[in-house]
Image (cartoon, rainbow, N blue to C red):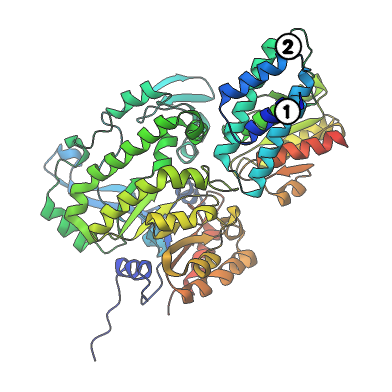
Amino acid sequence: MEDLLDEIRELIVELGDSNKIKRLVNEALTRKIPLSKIIGDSLRRGLEEVGRKYESGEYFLSELLYAGSLMNGILQMLKSHSRNQKMESGEVIVLGTVRGDIHDIGKNIFKMLAQAAGFEVIDLGVDLEPEIFVEKLKETNAKILGLSALLTTTRLEMKTVIDRLNQAGIRNKVKVLIGGNAVTKEFAKEIRADGAALDAVEGVEICKRWVSS
Amino acid sequence: MGEFMMMTPRERIKAVINFKKPDVLPWIEISYDETIIKWLKEGLPADKVTAIEWDIAREGRLLLNWPHVRGFDLYSYFGCQYMLGCYVPIDIGPIPRFKRSVLRENERYVDLRTETGAIARRIKSAEYTWYSMPMFLEFPVKDRKTWEDYKTRLNPEDPRRYPKDWHKDAYIEAFEQYQAANTVLTLTGFYGFGTQLMGIENFSTLYYKDIELMIDMIEHWEYFTIETIRYAVETLKDRIDMIYWWEDMAEKHGPCISPKIFKELFLPHYKNVTRFLNKNKVDRILIDSDGNINPILDLLSEAGITGLWPLEVNAGINAIDIRRKYGNKFFLTGNLDKRELVKGGGPMKKEIDSKVPILKELGGYIPGIDHLIPAEFTYQKFKEYSDYLKKYLSY
């Protein structure tokens, strides 16, 4: 069993052929290996290794994007096989691009990696009024809010959202992660966000740290 | 003793990009249109930046000499040069163009079919910012079939690629006479073209998903590029001071495609294009790429690239480090951190003080902001920056 899970993990790390990986995952299902083990011990560990390689400069955006799409393709496949085995759903992240900004590439990469890491991501879209974030957080009781902005002109909207969370009395119930090309660690401090992700991999790592603590 | 002759802006730029000493260091910028519009509201005198030309009334409708506004010349007003001074007017877009049209709209958004065949969205209230940063909803090339369809629009033999009034001797003369800035031939790179047709996510992962398609796209782009520019390059030769090769192939972390993919798939085609250019005495070849290009600088040099812009500080690029590591392999432009410059005062001065004198001494460097002039710059702060930077330009 462990050999098979290791092989799947290695294929993800080596950015192998998606059909081959799916075949091996199917084999694991046939062998009655629990879904949680397939996802946890091979798929997520493989993606984590890809993330580490990206952070260390061994892999680049092309590899990260491909690994994320591989992973999501397999997770989709597993969903259709999981009628008898419940797929655990992780901590919820409410995610979106702030008002006045309609860019979503960075947000989508983060979403893909966060889902692959086990988070349930509620992607509200782009160009969002601050109230939409507040309403969704209240509705879902999500503990993490991810805000994205590409432009330096629109990143100021992140502060508006945080102000609205304060006004709504839910600021201390939510960790706010900001990301996007215009975002820096200093800016996060300035607007009193809880964290700033300089790239999608770091963003997911921050969320994992928050959940585990 | 001969009379002291001041160099023209073009001569200054040519001197620097060829690692020679100019009489005065040139300074190059490119502005977003939205910045100019904002500055006009903040006090930039419209009459001082309006570019008026005498011409037979527009499009030849009347045989009447009449002055009309061609646009805004911000650069002369501030005493800098526009990077894309006089350019070779070749059409490297899809021919026929896709019909530009509004596909749908509501109170907030307009979705447009662009002339390259993409569908792009803009916020209605942000008309000017849309052009600098559009959001794409769909791209024209999705797979082998859509690529084969698109390829028919990328025919280098199409006579519409050159202006109707193209006359070899007239263009040679125009390129010899021009002195306001450098003369440029603009190209779109192998990654840039792919992302415009497929989107960043799709083209960046194509190596892993459909390598045959990626190879075909890149091979065709090399053929298309060389054959489209062939006549102009063989005619104008080194009257073209610089190739401006747009790529935008990196993000903050590093290149969007790995050095491995670059080396395997892109490098040979870069080399073929630069060999063709070099054969025609054009060897000042600048890559425009935002982001952290450090991991592929060796490969870019091997590819025949000899200039870099904008050298984005936010992505960890330091022009002094590049100069020290690579010697005179690259001429460098930009690298003044826009985030510090927009603050004005001490942070702006510190940024200039820490780089410009050193790079001026090392040579092969033209100062400028590390991208287009952003709208965050107020008119007053840019004037302050301009006045301070000018102190460093003379020798």
* Residue beneath disc 1: A3
Q: Is residue B380 left or right of residue B92?
A: right
Residue placed most toward the observer, A144 or B127: A144
Mark 2 Cα shell of 10 Å, populated few (<14), some (14-19), many (≥20): few
* Relative image position of residue A58 (x, y in whole percent): 61, 47
Query: Residue at point 62% right, 59% down?
Result: B343
Task: Tell me which amino acid carries mark 2.
Answer: Ser
Residue placed most toward the observer, A59 or B387: A59
Residue placed most toward the observer, B274 or A197: B274
Front position among marks 2 and 1: 1
What number is the disc on residue A38? none
* Relative image position of residue B356 (x, y in whole percent): 52, 70
Image quarter of the C terminus of chain B: bottom left
Residue B43 lies, with reference to residue B194, above or below; the image says below
Q: Do callouts 2 and 1 point to residues on the same chain? A: yes
Query: Residue at point 28% right, 33% down?
Result: B154
What number is the disc on residue A82? 2
